Image (cartoon, coloured by chain):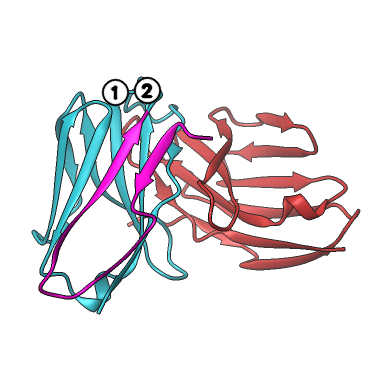
Chain colours: A red, B cyan
């Protein structure tokens, strides 16, 4: 049985502040780590796919790092804006199979 | 994004009803997926189709019946559901079924079973 854990479950951040949250996954047989951003009543939107240990990806003010040896990924948001309010999901593959194992998400609320 | 569309967006049905959820992708992808999301739980994969062939059935009860007539359309037929089947049902597609391929999601159908 393998689990993908995300923490914290929810997070309130003041507009303009930077923040980060964690995705933990089993480090054995790791294949890929996906990050998604999901706004209420919309479709989950892909942010990053990461495969290599030490990998770092960036998209605007959002970046992510990956440590496959210890089994975690961090998502960073610099200078939070109200439009960053969403649930951030991560999911991992333990082999080349398409089956993603999903975390329950971190709900981010940006306070103006 | 209108790459993956789902209809209806909301559905209320009784336990004896038969209804269908529809998903259509306009991305030219070969793989399509049905996921279930119950409140405060992670996404659960239900079915996977690759080139119209079902490649995964994650021990889903037979009251859920998928259909994939072509690579662009995916249906989920529902009959004699239970109240605990109330959830958000998401459809997704990807170019292939490789683990590094991004899955593109529709907005989901919010299903309530009375």
Q: Position of residue A55 (x, y in %)?
A: 65, 29
Q: Position of residue A33 (x, y in %)?
A: 51, 38
Q: Quadrant of residue B103?
A: top left
Residue drawn at x 48%, y 34% is B2
Identify residue for label 1.
B30
Q: Earlier in the sequence, mark 2 or mark 1?
A: 1
Q: Is residue A37 magenta?
A: no
Q: Quadrant of residue B113?
A: bottom left
Looking at the rendered image, the quarter that the N terminus of chain B falls into is: top right
Is residue A109 at least partly visible in the picture?
A: yes
Instruction: Reply above or below: B74 against A90.
Output: above
Q: Position of residue A37 (x, y in %)?
A: 60, 47
Residue in front for this viewpoint, A59 or B73: B73
Q: Position of residue A27 (x, y in %)?
A: 48, 44
Q: Residues within 10 Å of mark 2 (few under 14, many from 20)?
A: some
Prevailing secondary structure of the magenta residues: strand
The chain carrying label 1 is B
Residue in front for this viewpoint, A68 or A105: A105
Residues rendered magenta in the picture: B1-25
Is residue A29 at least partly visible in the picture?
A: no
The chain carrying label 2 is B
How many marks overall?
A: 2
Instruction: Reply above or below: B102 against A9.
Output: above
Identify residue for label 2.
B95
Instruction: Reply above or below: A6 against A91.
Output: below
Q: Is residue B14 left or right of residue B39?
A: left
Residue in front for this viewpoint, B85 or A98: B85
**Does the CB distance between marks 2 and 1 fall below 8 Å?**
yes
Residue drawn at x 73%, y 37% is A63
């Amino acid at each position: 049985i393998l689990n993908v854990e995300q923490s914290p479950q929810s997070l309130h951040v003041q507009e303009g502040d930077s923040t980060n949250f964690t995705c933990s996954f089993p480090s054995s047989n790791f294949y890929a780590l996906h990050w998604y951003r999901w706004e209420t009543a919309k479709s989950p939107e892909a942010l990053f796919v990461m495969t290599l240990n030490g990998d770092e990806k960036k998209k605007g003010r959002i970046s992510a790092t990956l440590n496959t040896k210890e089994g975690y990924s961090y998502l960073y948001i610099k200078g939070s804006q109200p439009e960053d309010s969403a649930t951030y999901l991560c999911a991992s593959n333990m082999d080349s199979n398409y089956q993603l194992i999903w975390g329950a998400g971190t709900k981010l609320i940006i306070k103006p | 994004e209108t790459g993956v569309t789902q209809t209806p967006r909301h559905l209320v049905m009784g336990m004896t009803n038969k209804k269908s959820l529809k998903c259509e992708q306009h991305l030219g992808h070969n793989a399509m997926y049905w996921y279930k999301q119950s409140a405060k739980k992670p996404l659960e994969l239900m079915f996977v189709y690759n080139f119209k062939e079902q490649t995964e059935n994650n021990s889903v009860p037979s009251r859920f019946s998928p259909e994939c007539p072509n690579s662009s359309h995916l249906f989920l037929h529902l009959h004699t559901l239970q109240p605990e089947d109330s959830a958000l049902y998401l459809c997704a597609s990807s170019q292939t079924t490789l683990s590094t391929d991004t899955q593109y999601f529709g907005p989901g159908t919010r299903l309530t079973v009375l």
